[in-house]
Image (tube, coloured by chain):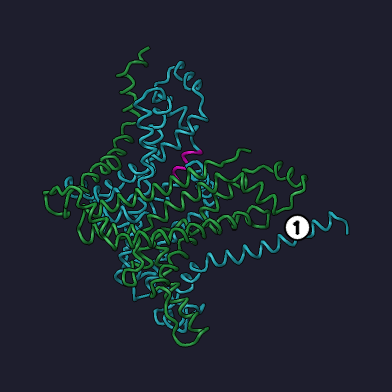
Chain colours: A cyan, B green
Amino acid sequence: MTENEKAARQKKISHIIMWIVLLVLFICFITPFLLVIINVFKTKADITANPLALIGAHGFTLKNFPEAMKKMNFWTVFGNSAIITICSTILTIAVSSTAAFVIVRNQKWKFCTFIFSLMIASMVIPFQVLMVPLVSVYGGTLGVLNHRLTLILMHVGFSVSMAMFMFHGAIRTNIPLELEEAATIDGCSRWQTYWKIVFPLLKPTVATVAIINAMAYWNDYLLPSLVLTKKELYTIPIATQAFYGTYSTDIGLVMAALLLAMLPILILYVFLQRYIVQGVTAGAVKG
Amino acid sequence: MKQNTLSYKIKQYFMFAGPGTILFFCVVIVPFIYGLYLTFTSWDGVSSTKPWVGLSNYAAAFADKDYWAALGRTAIYSVFAVVLINILAFFLAYLVTSGVKGQNFFRSGFFVPNLIGGIVLGYVWKFVFNRAFVALGSAIAGGTAPSLLSTPNGAMFCLIVVSVWQYAGYMMLIYVAGFMSVSEDVKEASSIDGCTASQTMWNVTVPLMRASFVQCLFLSITRCFVVYDVNLSLTKGEPFGSSVMAAMHVYNQAFTYKNYGLGQAEALILFVVCAIVGVTQVMIGKKGEVEA
């Protein structure tokens, strides 16, 4: 055997070992989900008797789903989550990309640098510091809690600095000033320049910002739980929490509720995983 | 010409950045400043008057044994979680960039826990710890095995396990980006110079990935310090309040016991501690950064 053959063989063996290690880790990673899936089709008694069995003694059942859906008000809750996530994401993109546009193009103006630094600095403030005053101002003084719109605007306000920062970087490095000057000479107003020239060139950043923020909005619990206290306004995480509080002993229903809470985003992930992984990586590395 | 006047600039600014700036001030800056004011009052959340009490909230916060216990617990939890998250994430990133079959599939697979919110993950794991592991333990040891969540140390252990599982996939993506940023040329050069594979790894690749380490550590530290969702759903602070983390203590202080001023003061201390740890880590990390 030549040196090369030996090296190639060694490499192959090490790849097989690595593949096995990966597979084992992967199975560990998804075991919790698998356990939910095998138990969701069992009756309560079967789960209590043996949560590890693939099929319960009373056989396969779909009964848990309709009951859990009814009790957690699934479609209403799902609709709330969807409306809030979609509106907040679109607004975040609109508001932060325009802000970044004006801030990048006025870099010498002290006011813009000040706002920019303020936004960057604010990113380190954890939500815990803001939640009491938020509830106090918007719940006590202004009384605007329990509206979806309030939550949407708050979501946007919290993520505008991060999103603005990402658009800021994209505009500064990818869009030459000459391009905008050319548009102005051709008779574009600032709005037209932004909308027809700048925004279309920002598409990759728009995707990144949309993915990161939509995931954060969809899964957020603490802020929505403080803003939305009426049952008909609940989002999926709040509804899951409330459901667990009431029906924690009815473990079959809990399994169905948990699976329902996870399904929408998992289905989306199957179709968009490439974009989601790319978006999250880009966002994490730039942020 | 008209583009240089101040009024034109202001008009432009508010046309484009107005909504963003206003929302940002409404939910971040104003509450932050108002929160500072609240720490000097003894507001109960209901009454319209907010009596001025000076620094007594801070004095109470420093004397609040439960708070410092929670903060200490959070520090211990964070140390374990951060170290384990980063070791596992780095290891995963190494495996999924080594060119084995299906590495993209594994990459997306390990990321799945990040898609789902902490509340749901916490309940899923609660089921795993309380039912599945108990059944497994009973089957192996015989009799009825107790749940890990029923002892203080066990609950802490569970929290760490879930956090590591939750964040490892996310940090893995950052390390993957780090691995990809190290060019093959440098690695090849080092192997020609006589480095073994592991020497190349530790003496060439890892130092060049320093930025990834700094970032992952920063992200995992800042996230672990304010952990709340998983804490709430997985342990709810049980047993006997032994797994109440700092963020949960702050929440309870403000919204359960209605000590808004005190709760806010404690939140602010948490923020300062978190910021000091985070910034120190980044400063130390940035100091020794090497450029390729």
Q: Quadrant of residue A81?
A: bottom left
Q: Quadrant of the N terminus of chain B?
A: top left
> Total of numbered circles in the picture?
1
Q: Amino acid at mark 1?
A: Lys
Residue A106 in the image: x percent, y percent? 40, 24
Residue A73 in the image: x percent, y percent? 31, 63
Residue on which the image places disc 1: A11
The local secondary structure at tag 1 comes to helix
Residue at figure coordinates x 48%, y 29% from the top left: A172
The residue stretch that appears in magenta? A204-211
Q: Quadrant of residue B152?
A: bottom left
Question: Is residue A183 in sight in this rendering?
Answer: yes
Of the pair B280 and A205, the residue shown nearer to us: B280
Residue at figure coordinates x 21%, y 61% from the top left: B257
Q: Quadrant of residue A25?
A: bottom right
In the rendered view, tell whether residue A119 sits above or below residue B259.
above
Residue at figure coordinates x 39%, y 27% from the top left: A102
